[in-house]
Amino acid sequence: MHSISNKKINQVTDQTLVVGMDIAKKKHYACFVDERGRGLKKPFPVLQSKEGLEWLYQCIVEAMKEFGKTEVIVGIEPTGHYWLNLAYFLDEKGIPLVMTNPMHVKRSKELDDNLPTKHDAKDALVIARLVKDGRFSYPRILKGMEAELRVGATFRSKLVEEQGAVRNQMIRWLDRYFPEFTQVFPSFGKMALAVLEYTPFPSDLAGKELEEVLALYRQSEGLQSPQSPKAKKLIELAQHSIGVTEGQQMARIEIATLVRRYRQLEEEIEALTEQLIELVQTSVEYDG
């Protein structure tokens, strides 16, 4: 542990220009200090744009010449995803990037002036001084296959989360209009979705014969053989349902929309999963 800390501290020498940056969505703040934390350039704004980042790079190059520095290190306090553009830009320029702990930044501000309030310019200086003390970590700048897998996995997680939200909306809908439904279908498989597509209300099953209902469900895509016992039990439960009967016109539109979205998400998740598997299988490290 001590050897790692010492290595970080030793990374900043009298030849190192330390850059502290406070990250935001549209405008960052940067400041330059030396190895002792003395300010070399007052905090200044850096726009989150190609021109803004190129200007930052020129400022770094000029400062290194002006103050006789041969090395540079840039430290940030990570804020959401806004730091990624800067990270890849600096990586292309061959400039090392490190991260400070947000809690350390907050505590350091309190030590300086007993004011933990947010102040972009002040934060940049605090971050720079934490970096010169070796209080930072190294972020992973993902590239190639690793970057593809991370983006794909993150997006897949969002789709699964959205599908879960749609599932919960469908459950709430059923609690109101067909609470007995879950006695037959505890989850939303193909037949359950077919039922919600063609006979979402107990009244839709009233007066219908078993074969008539099964014929309806066969029209649902991907469902060739609906299960007769489940359909029979559902018809029986529908006869004594306590489901709400008011507002069904709009409720029918609601459940139809939810079913379409649920199926769409199911397809998207499946397709994305297959693509991620193909990426892994085509990678050099995969030994199958």
Image: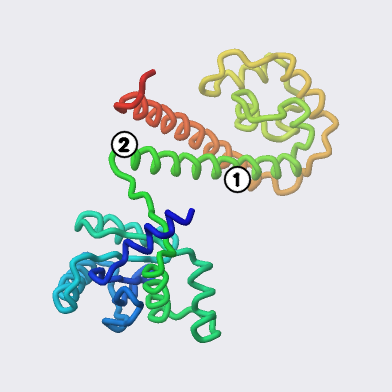
Q: How many marks?
A: 2
Quick check: 126 above or below 178?
A: below
Instruction: Residue at 75%, 25% (x, y): give it.
Output: 184
Q: Position of residue 36 (x, y in %)?
A: 34, 77
Task: Measure how far apart labels 2 and 1 are at the Cα level.
Answer: 30 Å
Q: Position of residue 243 (x, y in %)?
A: 79, 40
Quick check: 40 above or below 256?
A: below
- Specify whether 10 is left or right of 77: left
Task: Using the rendered view, name the quadrant where residue 23 is placed.
Answer: bottom left
Nearer to me, 246 or 186: 186
- Disc 2 element: helix
Which label sits in the foreground, 2 or 1? 2
Residue at the limit of the structure toward the right, as seen here: 240
Instruction: Residue at 49%, 66% (x, y): give it.
Output: 102
Earlier in the chain: of badge 2 and badge 1, it is 2
Quick check: 197 above or below 46?
A: above
Q: Quadrant of the C terminus?
A: top left
Task: Using the rendered view, name the quadrant where residue 274 is placed.
Answer: top left
Instruction: Residue at 31%, 25% (x, y): give it.
Output: 282
**Which residue is label 2 attached to?**
145
Camera sees residue 24: no
Dot 2 amino acid type: Met
**Which residue is label 1 attached to?**
165
- Disc 1 element: helix
